[in-house]
Structure formats: C-alpha cells, structure tokens
Amino acid sequence: MNSAGESPFQNSYSKEPCLIGMMRNHRLWRVAALSRLMNLVSLFIGRVRGRRGRFWSVRTSVTSVMGLCQSWMKLCFLVNPSGKIPVRSITRTFASGKTEKVIFQALKDLNLPSGKNEEMEPGDFTFEKFWELCQIICPRTDILQLFSHLNGGTSDYLTLNQLVRFLNEYQRDPRLNEILFPMYDCKWAQQLINTYEPNEDFRKNGWLSCDGLCRYLMSDENAPVHLDRLELWENMEQPLAHYYINSSHNTYLTGRQFGGKSLVEIYRQVLLAGCRCVELDCWDGKGEDQEPIITHGKAMCTDILFKDVIQAIKETAFVTSEYPVILSFENHCSKAQQHKMARYCEDILGDLLLKQPLENHRLEPGCPLPSPEDLKLKILIKNKRLKPEVEQKQLEAFRNLMEVGINEHAAVLDYENDEETETTPTLVEVEEEVTSMSAELSDVSPDQEKPAQGSHKMKKQDSLSAESEQAWLAAYKYTGATTNIHPYLSAMVNYVQPIKFQGFEQAQEKNTHYNMSSFNESVGLGCLKTSAIEFVNYNKRQLSRIYPKGGRVDSSNFLPQIFWNAGCQMVALNFQTSDLAMQLNQGRFEYNDSCGYLLKPDFMRRPDRTFDPFSETPVDGVIAATCSVQVISGQFLSDKPVGTYIEVDMYGLPTDTIRKEFRTRLVPNNGLNPVYNEEPFVFRKVILPDLAVLRLAVYEESGRLIGQRMLPLEGLQAGNRHVSLHSEANRPLTLPTLFCNIVLKTYVPDGLGDLVDALSDPKRFLSQAEKRANQMKAMGIEACDISDVPECTWTRPVSGHGQSSWNMSRSTGSCVEGRSPPCVTNGTTAGRAYRGEPVIPPLKIEELIQSKVYLKLVKKQSRNMERLQKKHAKELQGTMKSQTSNVLPSKEEGAAGWRRRLTRIPSRVQRPQILQWTVKVVRCGREIGAQALPPRPGSHSRGPSCSPGKAVGSSQRGTNEPRAGPACGHASAAT
C-alpha cells in the first residue's frame, strides 16, 4: 500500500517494508469506543491523509490481506518499554492449537529471534516476514490443489495463457457484457504477475508461482464484493421516500426494554455506525431544574438529559455521513418543557436544524419529498404538528404573550399569586384568544400552508431570568386545546409529519408526501398480509416506520427483510442487540459508503410499475439469478482445537429465502485451517437479486457463533474468493477468513438449458450434418467429395386440415421453406427432425373440439374475417364510385355525353388508374378467399385444398390480365 489504489503486496518483495512508509510521519491516536454498543474498548488509529486513508478504510473490512496487515501493524506498534516486539506476543497472536515449538521453529527458519523470552526489532519484522510466517503456520493446501489443477501439475508456475484462462473461466462473472467489461488478456495478466509475484525471474518470464497466486487470491483485487459498492456510488438525488434509511429504535437503551440503562454515548456510537434515524422518548424532568429527560417511560429505566443528547447528536451527526439525520420524537412532555426542547434544538443545533421547508419542495399535495442531496448536513424533526392555521394563531398569541411577559414580567408573577391584580384583564384577554382556538391535530392543510412565524427567538438581554421564565411558562396554558403540542416545537416540523394511519386509499387520495405513519411489526405484517401491493405503492410516495412490538422486552429484533421487500424506508431495530436481524441490517447498509441511505430498486420507485413482494415469478425487467457457493476451507477460525462447520443462507423475497438447509460437514479438532471441500450449495432461482443477501456463518461444534458475513448479492463477485469474517456485533475480525468458490449465472427455466447454451455459444452446438461431416473427415473423406442434396419442402397431411409443411415464418419459431427444421437439442427429438418426422405429435379433431384455446382462436379469426370483409367492401365501393364518375356522364351532358364517353378511348393518365384499381379488386378477392373461416371441427365437407405457397386464382398470363374467381372453393364477396 505504498500509494493509493495499490495492493498491500505491491513492492512487498522490495527493501522498504510494506505499510511502514505509509504510517511514517503520521500520528497515532488512541480512541475510546464501545464494543457491542456497551463495553468500552480502546482502538489505535493511524492518521492517514488523502486517498490512502480512503483506501485503508474501505478495504479494512473486506479483504483478507487487510486482516493480516492489521495483525502485523498491531505487533509492530504494541512494543515493550524497550521499543521491541516480544516473541511471546507473536505466539499469542497465532494461538490456534499449535504448540509454541512450531512457531519458534518457523521464526528460526526466517532468521528471527525464536526464544520464548527473546525480542526483536520492529524493523526486522517486516510484512514479508510476517507473510511467510503465516504460510508456515497455516499452510494452504487448498490453493496448491487449485494451482496443480490449472497447470496440470507439470510445472511450478502458471504461464500467461493459463492465467488468462483462469481469470476468464473461473474469476469472471459470465453475466457481464463483453463490450462494457472486456475479457482479461495477457497484458492484464502480466500486470497481476508484476504486482503479486515475489520471484523476480518469474516476473520477467511472465510466470506466476503458487505463492504469487495465493497473494492475488487474498488481495483487494480479488475481493468478494465490488469495491466500488463500498464507496458512495448510488444516485442521491431521488426523493427521500425512494431510499432505505438506517434507523434505530429506543436508541438510548443499552440493554433490556424494562429496567435497562440509558446512555448518552449510545447516540454517538449509533450515528458513527451509519444510523440516520434515532429515537428520543421525551418526558418531563422530575428534578428541581425541570429539565426534559429521555427515558423509557414507566419501564424503570435510567434517565438522561435531553439537552445532552442533542449536544451528542450535533457532535457526531455528520462524521460518518453528510446526509440528513431524522430525530424521531416520542413526545410525552408538557408544553412548558416542549418549549424548552424546541429552544435546545434551535440553540444547540443552529443552522443544522431544518426549520422551514425548501422553496423547491413545498408542503403541497403531489409535491415529492426533497432528496438526501438537497438535505445534506440537515437535521429533521419527526413530531406531531398542529394545523397550519392553528399553529400560526397560537404562535402569534405566544409571541404577544412573551412580549407582555418581557415588559410586564412582574405582573405575570403577580397574576399567578393574585387573580385580582390590575394586569388580570389584559392577560385574560390574551388567554381567551388562545382558548378560543381549535387545536385539533391533523395533517397539514396544503392550501393554507404558510411559513410559520414561530422563529421568534428572545435575545438574552430581553429575556426573563431562569426563575421568572419557569414561572411564566407555568402560567401559559391552553385551557381549551385538545392537543398537547407546543406551537414553537410544531413549527419546526416539516417533511416528516407523523399521522395516524387511516388506510391506503385515503393516503392515496390525499397524496401528501410529507405525511408518514409508524407501524409496529405486528400491524406491519398485517398490512403485508392483506394489502401487500398497496403497501409498496404507499412507500413509493410516503415514508413509513416499522418498530418492534412491545412484547420484545429483551430488546430482540424482527427480521427487517420482509419490510424491505415492501419498500418500507425506516425499519427501526434495537442496535444494542447483536442478533441475526441486526447483522442483516448492518451488512446491507455497509454498502454505499455506510452513509445510511440505500436506493430502492427501480420498480419499487416508479408509479407506473406494480410489484408484489410475495411474487414467485420473475419481475418484469429484472433478470433472475442462480447462485452457487462452495465452501472450500477456512483460515484462523478459532484459537482453540475445536470442530467447526459452516452454514450458508439466503435472505430476500419469501420465495428467495432459504434458511437452515445448507450446512457443511463438521471438521473436528481443527480451528486453524479446516478443509471442507463440500459440494456446491445451489440457490437455483433468485427472483430479485437486488434485495437478496447471502450469509456465511461459522459455528463451533457446540453451536457458538465464531464469525459471520453478510454479502448482498447485488455486488457479489464470482470466482474463488476469500471472505473475511465479522463478529457477532458486525465488527471485522482480523485473521478469520473463508475460502469459497462462488458461481453466478442467469436463471434458466427447466427445459431451456440446451437452447440457452446453443444461443450463447453456437460453435459448441453444431448441427447434426456438420458433426457427421467432421466424423467423415476423420475417416479420410474430404468436403469436396460430398455433394449437396437438392432442397425440398417436406409436407405431411393432417387430418381435416389438408397439407401442412415446414414452410412457416421464422417469427413463429418454425422453419423456413427449403431448410430442415433447426436441430438444437440432442437425442430423439433431433433424430426425428432430421428424418423429417413431426417433432410435435398431431392432434385429433375430438381434442380440438374440447380445446378452449382453439375455440377462442376460431372466434378471433371470425371477427378478423368480418372486419376485413367490411374494409374491402368499403374500398370496393369507393373504387367503383371513383371509376364511374370518370366514365358516366352527368345529367347536364345528357345523351350527347353518353355518346362521347362510349366512343372515347381512355387517356394516358386514365389507363394506369384503371389498371391499378382493377388489380386491387382482384387482390381483394384473393385475400378474402385466403382468409375464409375454416369449418368447425367435425365438419368434413370443404373445398379443394390449396398450397399456401401459391396465389390462388391467379392467371399465368401476368398481372395485366387478372382472372377473378373463387379462392380455395370459397366465394369472394369482393369479386
């Protein structure tokens, strides 16, 4: 990693150690972090500038070589007081059931200090030495077998051609377009050899050794996923409802929902992990200061201050991602403390808080939500909102009352204690104005939406003291209000306005994109069960939030995949629980630079597309896939000599989800380098690859999870890949990896495999005649000795239908006249086609009588016949009228006109017209005769059959002398 974009193995065989040059002259920071969002741990992070830092951060959790680099750097940095690396630290790193004698002997072979109590200089322990040590401790017999298979076991290297063949046939996705994604060539193969081959002589000759192949297979160029998927690659200019949003439920808790501990630090950790929607359960404080707090209501959970949480959100909201953060308020506070909440949000967040809607995205029906790009570095509040007219009046009254309180604050205090003071009438008038307002909560009326005038902010020099303000706020009451929402807080809500869900039809009629609804998992599943398609259409337009049901007191999670299939944007999970659902969530949102936003598939965004999340057939415009996974081996899986096995699952649409079916055999007493060599696990039909996720999980024989990895199928790469594992909490593990062979293909239905293979590679599927010609050539018969067979059309009679032939159009999938039927398949079908026998057996008349399809076609043909006859009759009448107008005289001309026209010869202009219309009349007669309706099955009386290859009723004398008459025994109405 001497420069950005280079492999860690680049120049690893040179004098300068890998990675040391990168870290030189940079700072090393110690950062306190939380493991599993609860346990505090320490991390050492090196400050790396520019693209190098980007290179390191993106690939750390993806490629296996980065795990080796991390382990090596840890040994180099964690030195003893004398600045040297103890040998004991190295033995602890590789404690995988191997005795210390093996490690000591390996160090001795590498000319390094090998004594138990010895130590070495960090400069002597280069990454190249560390790599060789790993190869000795964990030998890769699986890669050696692959290497021998590629070169046939005849040499100790791969040639350029062998390497190119390996890259194109084993490591390339066959679904890729060869123009957009060209095949590997010798030039590219030579670049790989120059990068990963440690032997200089091999590099000059264009050879790749087994060690070089191993280095390539573990490098970032052979990552299991496309590295660009881990960067910001998706379009971020779509409406907010078109994205999946990484969301948290009861963010403040560190454990159970009942009696759990609340912690401010959790908000920092969750936001740093990529979450974009956090929840704040707000309650009135019980202390003397009356500060709003965040807790889980009456569930005996500890309290944290609201203002501390807002401060933590400000500090970490846009560290990992610049895209908007949504604060989901579950508001139980009184209006006095709601005003405090609004003030804290305004004062602490400042310009980060979005208080007014954008000019280009008004709060009107049909107006889509702004995009994440439009809302960059903005924080949105999700809280119930008053009607705009009520909100505006209450804000005006609140502002007037505050002015009265500022100018007459002594009178306010007197008003509380003495109702007969002189200021009572003035304050009563104000309160009556407030009382007369109707404060019913509902969705915002678009026609009356105006910028709220509640941005009034008291200056410190004009404000009351803390005690006076508390007393004044206590006197400010909404006696006649039916809601408990402070207008000052209500005015800060814009694009995320929660309302009670009243049905999909009503939501579609209102078409207010800024309204959203929340569902617990049970209600959400009910909506999916009864109205799945409507739920998908709802999520194309508006936001929906799914949260765990109340019965999950242990903070467990539901699987979010079922709601992602319906397009639900904010599927809120308990981040403190590292279960399967949370692993699935973190694995999916690892894509797109962990920004917390993932663009939904096209058909889940377009209003003109219909999608059923329970569909079992391929979606229009989406190519189904076939995924095959063969688990070959594992490396450094456990530091104990335990048995291990692997489970392979697939999550996606219900028809794509396969769980607990694919499992390898148990390899006993080997946690270091077990070899499984299982038969491939085939997921034959994945209808929607964009939403499918592949899961690899490693378990001990006792059932304890060692490591897991979630790989979205959308960015998965085919070939032999090393999959680095993550912990249960989805943190990257440094050494444990799985070596797998992944095959990705386009799904082909049963019975069409041979046809697809023939179309994809016609050279491999020669016709029967070409195969026999090649066999004759092997016997000494040359092509010039074989003469061509005269072309003919094979026909056969069909009962009740005259003669049918192979002379049919290619568009119907049949043969062209003069050619034998196409031979795509082998065996009996091909033999019949070559001998001229019918491939499809003939049907009997009795079977046709009972066939609904045939009767439907007969009716359709009858309707077409009637329409065609009317069309031709109309054209015939128009032709006769135009011709008679040129021949017959008008009434004014009389008998003299008759004599002139009967004796006049047609002019040169009239002759072609007469001939043209005469030919048209004859052709109309022929077409009507050819389209005559055949008799119903069972009726054997019909006219003489005619060959469709000839024009019935045509004369041999040419087109200038047409002969009209019945066609095929049917009278022509046109003639």
Image (cartoon, rainbow, N blue to C red):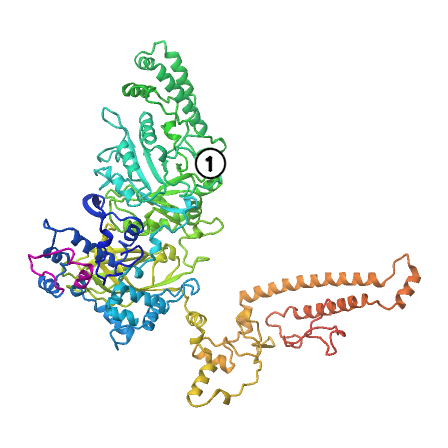
Residue 286 visible to the viewer:
yes
Where is 567 relative to 818, above or below?
above
Q: Does the magenta stretch include residue 123?
A: yes
Q: Is mark 1 on a helix, strand or loop?
A: loop
Image quadrant where one finds the N terminus: bottom left
Where is residue 440 shown, x and y percent of the image? Answer: 42, 29
Q: Does the magenta stretch include residue 597?
A: no
Quadrant location of residue 686? bottom left
Q: Main secondary structure of the magenta part?
A: loop
Where is residue 83 shown, x and y percent of the image? Answer: 12, 51
Residue lying at 81% horizontally and 65% vertically, measured from the top left: 909
Where is residue 970 shown, x and y percent of the image? Answer: 69, 71
Q: Is residue 955 left or right of residue 582?
A: right
Q: How crowded is mark 1: few (under 14 residues within 10 Å), some or many (20 or more)?
A: few
Where is 252 relative to 852, above or below?
above
- What residue is shown with label 1? 359
Where is residue 209 shown, x and y percent of the image? Answer: 25, 70
Q: Which of 967 and 570 is in front in this view?
A: 570
Where is 33 relative to 337, above or below?
below
Residue 146 visible to the viewer:
no
Residue lying at 39% horizontally and 22% vertically, measured from the top left: 398
Residue lying at 10% horizontally and 49% vertically, measured from the top left: 81
Q: Is residue 178 left or right of residue 301?
A: right
Image quadrant where one finds the C terminus: bottom right
Where is 135 relative to 802, above or below?
above
Quadrant location of residue 859? bottom right
Residue lying at 15% horizontally and 55% vertically, measured from the top left: 122
Q: Is residue 491 left or right of residue 131?
A: right
Q: Nearer the viewer, residue 298 or 50?
A: 50
Three-letter amino acid code at the position of disc 1: Glu
Q: Nearer the viewer, residue 839 or 689?
A: 689
For the record, the magenta segment spans 110-133
